Each structure stands twice: as structure tokens, then as C-alpha cells.
Image (cartoon, rainbow, N blue to C red):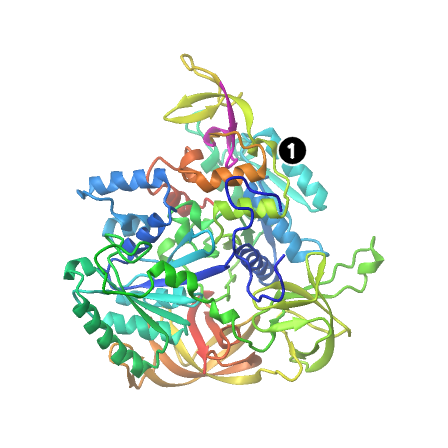
């Protein structure tokens, strides 16, 4: 690597963190994101200029940082956020992807969508209002989708005179219901997104708070789904058989291409191919034309095996002795995403890793009322409903529980009549 | 390359791995995909990602360029050369052919052909029966793009409906479509301009010469620089200046402006990008400034 002028040649690379911001309509979520981008100097002059113009046009004195995230015409007209928006910033040591999820009740599906790829969730609370139904709902969803870290940002501290008492009371309220949900890893931060207190800079008005700033927390958080040692799971995406007449060396080449969903694999490891159950060893691990001694979670690689085994897309390669469950019946928490309700009489398609299977609902055990956390009986599911269900599958899938393994515990439901993605499931 | 004892990926390795995964999903799920390759820097990165995704095999898709006929020769020459080096098939379809057919009608002879690429693209999709088009658009480029899915569904008219997008969860992409519809796929959605330059440097990717600083005749209009070319000649009263410039983005000549720069190596471009104060599209795309919602509008109409 050549030296980069004006920048240190070796910037410490702490990888990438994906996080989600959720809050009610007026919690100042867009302002918080705007502040993160602004203070990390990600907003460039022309964007700032356009924001200034629009803010003035709307009769505001200061720049409205929320303008940054209101992307669609309909959103600008209504002054609300409709869809998940993705934003990017870097601190020099880490790259961040923010998924900005809308706070409205009817958009639960967007929050689940945004949460599915997040390592951390920032849940915003308006210091004047405290813990609301929406706070509970967002926390439940973040927990349901198993986001490893939850940060509760108590915002608008400027409007409660930066009172520690208010902060402590909200924290106690939150902890009381978080304990009931089983949420363990929670951090609380008092802040003012509007004034920039405790986001990148500490400000001068929150002396009583000794914990980290928001950006310190983000810098320190582990992207934890690659941290702990999970079993090796390699869903086959694509089989490479070049059969290049000009190159006899490639005649017998059979490369199994995919991304390591979890765990580690090394050359020589004993592996089992599902569904056939055939056992063999890893002959080579390749990226492009180079060879690697081992590969780990999130790397896209090509596996070559010792024996010639018939393997196609949808099969899974795992380590011998670390088998997932091979099953045609699953129990799952399901979030329904479609305007047309889940119809128990219809067949759907389930996509799990790279594998598709026809599926039928076997039963709805209960629907979760995410406002009261009560279980209710249900015959059908409507958009934004969350329920515990069971499915019968036409083909076996190779699954782990979602709590153990996000990659092999998650599935989507597709309606073949529209090709739409209509449900998101987490295997129990 | 990542050290293999430390089990997290650097941010570039993560982005690259995600992009490879997305391309392989297209190959696994779609029956007749195509990769859009213009010779621009983003699509040059896409070709390297495709090599990493599919070598030693051939790409499971051809390359295609929708040529407005108003592209810099350095770029189209590079496009042809790169496709030949890779030994992959390149399809070129031209806006001028659509004009000859009468499916593209310009309001005036000097109207930018950029937005008319949509028509030619849709005609090519129909001609070849493509069910997926892989493109190099990024979410950091523009507000409407920030909300677009990685696998973005288009109806028979090529229209994007921003309020009715398929939910996209985990890494489970849904590329299903009926005949006549298609999916636009953006493997480098999560990359920023800075990531692209860092990747070009790391992978030592060759670029068309106009990305590097060079002296060019320009006139200044509306606060921006417009290169003086056969297609965009100077008007009476214009002052022609010879300025050292480079392009941050290359596209149709009529709507792509250079920036003043001395950066003649990738390292210098990266250094400039790190301290730049104007966004990529703001600096260089004359077509996006017309209205705040112009990209969203064009995407609804089938633009990439």
C-alpha cells in the first residue's frame, strides 16, 4: 500500500458497525442523526447550503438537521419519515451504517427490517415524556430481532434543565420493564441532539453524567455476531464449474461459492454436506485466485472439497460433528409485513439461507400485543402483527435457533402470487 | 489482506464481501441478469468484485452500456479495452438508435440525453429479456437512493415505487419477478465515494485518464465548470479558460462537470476526497440540482 498524503498511511481499521435509531415522531431522531453526521464532518458544504435554504423557507432560524434524512417527496410534504433510510459516516477508525427507522405505529415492519442487520440500537426517549408505549414497542422489537447492544438515549435534556433527577427516573422506569423482557445489555445516555451535548462533545451542562458520550459507545461496541465462536455454517450460493476447454487444469474444478454465515473453517477440516449427509474434507479455500488457510464469518469464499460430491445451491456445508437441525417443521416468531393478511389456508414460500421451500402454516399459538406484552389468540395475522407460529415445510431446512445463530435462524416468507416478501421469521 | 488471527473484517473487506455475496445471489436466483458497465469508477469496482465472485469461471452475465453518444472517448475506449481484457461479452445500446426509432424525442437538439437513457435501457431489457440489471449506484449519492433497497423491484414500465418497496431483511434477498418485470441490484449500495477510492487504490484498479488531473478548456456557467467540447461548444461571450481539472464522476458530457484539481495519482485523489467540502453529485452533476426531488422523479420513471 502506498502512503496517502495528508492522512496517516495506516489508519487503524476497527471495521464496520451497523446501528439503528428508533424513536417516536418527535423524539428528535432525525436531528440526532444529522448531529452525528454534522459533528463527524460528514455533511459537506453544498448539502449544508441546501439545508440552510430549506430551513429558511420553512421559517426556521437554525439549520434543521432533520432535513438530511427526509429523503422522499411524500416525506418532505408531510414532514415525517416513511421508509428506512441508510446513512454513512466514518470516524477515521470505524465506518458506520445508520438505518433510520420510522417511529409510526404502522411502520413496525420497517423497524424490523432495519433491525435485522443492526449490531446496536439507539432508542430515543424525549426527556419530557419519559417511557412511552412506543418506547416499549421499539425495545421489544429490538430484543425480538436480537440486537446485541441497546443504547437508551434520553434526548431533549435541554428542555428539562439538564436535570439528573429526570434522567434517573426515566432510567428506573425503563429498567423495570426491560427486566421483564429479558433485555440485559443496556446503556443510558442523557443528551441534547439539538445542542450537540454528549454526542461527540460532552458539552458543559451535563457534568453529573460520568459515562461515555454516544460516539465513545459506538466506537467501543463490538460487532458481536462475529465475536463469539459459532458453529461453521456455509450455505452454498452458486457452483462454479468453468469447464474451460483451453485450460485442462480447470476441467475437474468444482468450486462451492458462498459466504461463511458463522464460525471458522480451515483447509483439512472434516465437513458434512447437507442434505446428503456425505462427509469429506476441505481441500482449498479460495478468494479470487488466491488461497487462504482459513476463513471466518462474513467472508465470501469458494470452497473446494476432497471428494466429488453432487452439491448445488441451497445445500449447506457444515463441520462434521457440528450439525444444525435438519427439519421440516419449525416454530418461530413471525412478523407479518404485508397488507394482505396471512391466510392459514394458503401455501407460501419460505426462504432460509439460500434454500427455498413451500410452506404451510400449522398453527398460530398466540399473537403478541406489543403495547401490553400480552399473548392473544389469533386466526389470521395482519400487517405489523407479531406472533408465535409453526410452519410445515415441503423440503427440509438446516436450521439453528435464531438466538444461537442469526444467519441460520432467520427466514423470510414470500407470497408466490405477488412475489412479495410478506413475512420475517425467527426460529425458536 | 485481513490478518486471519483477528476475526473481524476491515471495513473494505466487509463491503467487498457483501458485494460478492449480492452478485452471487443474482447469479443463483436470476435466469438472465446483466451488469451495467459504463467505464466509470463505480462500475470498474463492480468488475473487480465480479472477478472475485466468479473466477476462475466466466461471469454469469454479459456487460452492457447504454451509450448516450455523448461520452468521453477516453471512457468508451477504456470500456471496450477492459471488457476485452476480461474476455467478457459487452453489449452497447445507444440512445441515438432510440432517437432514430422515434422512441426518444428530444425537446431541442442540445437537450441532455442523460435522462433518455431510461428509454434505451428499457428497450434493451426487453430485447434481451433481462430479469435483473446489476448497477453501481450507491446510497450515499443522493437522498432518494438512501431509501432504495439493494434488490429493487421495477414493474413493466421500469418504474420504482418508493412507497411500496419489498422489505429487505438480514441477507435474504428476494429477486423474484414475473416476466416483463425486472430487478435492479446495487451491490455497492453501502459504499461511499471515499470507500470507492480506497478500494481502487487497494486493488490497484486502472481508470480512464480523465479521472486524473489534466489541463482542459472550460467555460464557467452557473457557478460550475463546463468542458468545451464539440457537443458543448463555447457560446458567444464565453471566456474559455485552460484549467487543471479532474472528473469525480464520468457520464454524459452535457451534464458532467470536472473539478479543479492537481491530483494526478489515486493517493492524491484520496487525500483530496478526504478534505473535500462538496458532495460528489453536488459538484459534478448538473442534472440533479434542478429540483430537490429530481432523482426520485427520474427513478420513478425508470432511470437507474
Residue A193's place in the image compared with A325, above or below, is: above
Residue B90 in picture, x, y percent from top left? 65, 43
Q: Is residue B228 left or right of residue A365?
A: right
Residue at image coords 54%, 37%: B268
- The magenta segment is B242-256
Q: Residue B229 in magenta?
A: no
Q: Residue at x 23, y 52 (%)?
A: A195
Q: Is residue A411 left or right of residue B205?
A: left
B243 magenta-colored:
yes
| Residue carrying label 1 | B77
Along the line of sight, the residue nearer the viewer: A350 or A229: A229
- Residue with the most extreme top position: B237
Identify the residue at horizontal 59%, vertical 43% (top origin): A3
- Say what secondary structure mark 1 lies in: helix
**Image x and y of residue A253, in percent:** 77, 63
Say if residue A144 shows up in the picture.
Answer: yes
Amino acid at each position: 500500500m502506498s502512503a496517502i498524503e495528508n492522512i496517516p498511511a495506516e489508519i487503524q481499521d476497527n471495521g464496520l458497525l451497523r446501528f439503528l435509531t428508533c424513536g417516536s415522531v418527535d423524539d428528535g431522531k432525525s436531528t440526532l442523526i444529522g448531529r452525528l453526521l454534522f459533528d463527524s464532518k460528514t455533511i459537506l458544504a453544498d448539502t449544508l447550503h441546501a439545508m440552510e435554504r430549506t430551513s429558511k423557507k420553512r421559517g426556521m432560524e437554525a439549520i434543521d438537521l432533520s432535513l438530511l434524512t427526509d429523503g422522499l417527496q411524500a416525506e418532505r410534504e408531510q414532514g415525517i419519515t416513511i421508509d428506512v433510510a441508510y446513512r454513512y459516516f466514518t470516524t477515521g477508525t470505524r465506518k458506520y451504517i445508520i438505518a433510520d427507522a420510522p417511529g409510526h405505529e404502522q411502520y413496525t415492519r420497517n423497524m424490523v427490517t432495519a433491525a435485522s442487520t443492526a449490531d446496536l440500537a439507539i432508542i430515543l426517549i424525549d426527556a419530557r415524556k419519559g417511557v412511552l408505549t412506543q418506547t416499549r414497542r421499539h425495545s421489544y422489537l429490538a430484543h425480538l430481532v436480537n440486537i446485541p447492544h441497546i443504547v437508551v438515549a434520553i434526548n431533549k435534556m435541554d428542555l428539562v434543565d439538564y436535570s439528573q433527577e429526570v434522567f434517573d427516573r426515566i432510567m428506573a422506569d425503563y429498567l423495570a420493564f426491560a427486566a421483564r423482557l429479558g433485555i440485559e445489555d443496556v446503556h443510558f445516555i442523557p443528551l441534547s441532539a439539538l445542542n450537540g451535548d454528549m454526542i461527540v462533545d460532552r458539552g458543559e451542562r451535563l457534568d453529573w453524567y460520568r459515562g461515555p458520550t454516544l460516539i465513545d459507545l459506538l466506537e467501543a461496541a463490538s460487532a458481536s455476531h462475529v465475536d463469539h465462536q459459532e458453529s461453521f455454517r456455509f450455505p452454498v450460493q452458486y457452483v462454479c464449474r468453468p469447464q474451460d476447454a483451453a485450460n485442462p487444469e480447470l476441467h475437474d474444478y468444482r468450486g462451492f461459492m458462498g459466504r461463511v454465515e458463522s464460525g471458522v473453517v480451515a483447509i483439512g477440516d472434516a465437513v458434512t454436506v447437507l442434505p446428503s449427509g456425505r462427509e469429506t474434507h476441505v481441500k482449498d479455500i479460495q478468494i479470487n485466485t488466491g488461497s487462504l488457510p482459513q476463513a471466518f464469518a462474513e467472508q465470501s469464499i469458494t470452497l473446494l472439497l476432497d471428494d466429488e460430491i453432487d452439491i448445488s445451491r441451497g445445500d449447506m456445508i457444515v463441520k462434521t460433528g457440528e450439525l444444525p437441525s435438519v427439519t421440516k417443521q419449525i416454530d418461530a416468531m413471525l412478523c407479518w409485513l404485508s397488507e394482505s393478511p396471512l391466510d392459514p389456508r394458503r401455501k407460501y414460500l419460505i426462504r432460509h439461507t439460500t434454500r427455498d421451500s413451500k410452506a404451510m402454516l400449522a398453527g398460530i399459538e398466540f399473537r403478541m400485543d406489543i403495547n401490553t406484552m400480552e399473548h392473544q389468540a389469533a386466526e389470521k395475522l395482519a400487517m405489523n402483527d407479531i406472533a408465535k407460529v409453526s410452519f410445515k415445510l415441503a423440503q427440509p431446512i438446516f436450521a439453528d435457533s435464531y438466538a444461537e445463530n442469526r444467519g441460520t435462524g432467520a427466514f423470510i416468507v414470500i407470497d408466490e402470487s405477488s412475489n412479495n416478501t410478506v413475512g420475517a421469521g425467527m426460529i425458536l | 489482506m485481513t490478518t486471519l488471527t483477528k476475526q473481524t473484517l476491515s471495513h473494505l473487506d466487509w463491503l467487498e464481501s457483501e458485494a460478492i455475496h449480492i452478485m452471487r445471489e443474482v447469479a443463483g436466483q436470476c435466469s438472465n441478469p446483466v451488469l451495467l458497465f459504463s467505464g466509470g469508477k463505480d462500475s470498474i469496482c463492480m468488475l473487480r468484485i465480479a472477478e472475485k465472485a466468479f473466477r476462475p469461471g466466466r461471469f454469469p452475465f454479459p456487460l452492457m452500456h447504454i451509450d448516450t453518444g455523448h461520452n468521453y472517448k477516453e471512457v468508451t475506449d477504456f470500456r471496450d479495452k477492459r471488457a476485452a481484457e476480461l474476455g467478457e461479452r459487452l453489449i452497447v445500446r445507444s440512445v441515438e438508435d432510440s432517437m432514430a426509432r422515434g422512441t426518444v424525442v428530444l425537446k431541442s437538439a442540445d437537450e441532455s440525453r442523460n435522462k433518455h437513457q431510461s428509454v434505451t435501457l428499457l428497450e434493451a431489457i426487453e430485447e434481451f429479456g433481462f430479469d435483473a440489471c446489476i448497477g453501481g449506484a450507491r446510497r450515499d449519492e443522493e437522498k432518494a437512493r438512501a431509501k432504495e433497497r439493494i434488490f429493487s423491484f421495477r414493474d413493466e414500465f421500469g418504474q420504482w415505487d418508493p412507497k411500496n418497496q419489498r422489505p429487505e431483511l438480514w441477507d435474504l434477498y428476494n429477486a423474484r419477478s414475473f416476466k416483463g418485470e425486472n430487478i435492479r441490484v446495487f451491490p455497492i449500495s453501502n459504499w461511499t465515494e471515499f470507500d470507492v477510492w480506497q478500494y481502487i487504490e487497494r486493488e490497484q484498479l486502472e481508470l480512464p485518464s480523465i479521472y486524473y488531473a489534466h489541463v482542459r478548456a472550460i467555460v464557467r456557467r452557473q457557478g460550475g465548470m463546463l468542458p468545451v467540447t464539440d457537443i458543448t461548444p463555447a457560446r458567444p461571450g464565453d471566456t474559455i479558460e485552460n484549467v487543471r481539472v479532474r472528473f469525480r464522476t464520468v457520464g454524459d458530457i452535457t451534464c458532467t462537470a470536472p473539478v479543479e484539481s492537481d491530483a494526478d495519482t489515486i493517493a492524491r485523489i484520496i487525500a483530496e476526497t478526504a478534505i473535500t467540502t462538496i458532495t460528489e453529485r453536488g459538484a459534478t452533476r448538473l442534472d440533479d440540482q434542478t429540483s430537490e426531488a429530481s432523482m426520485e422523479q427520474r427513478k420513478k420513471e425508470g432511470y437507474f
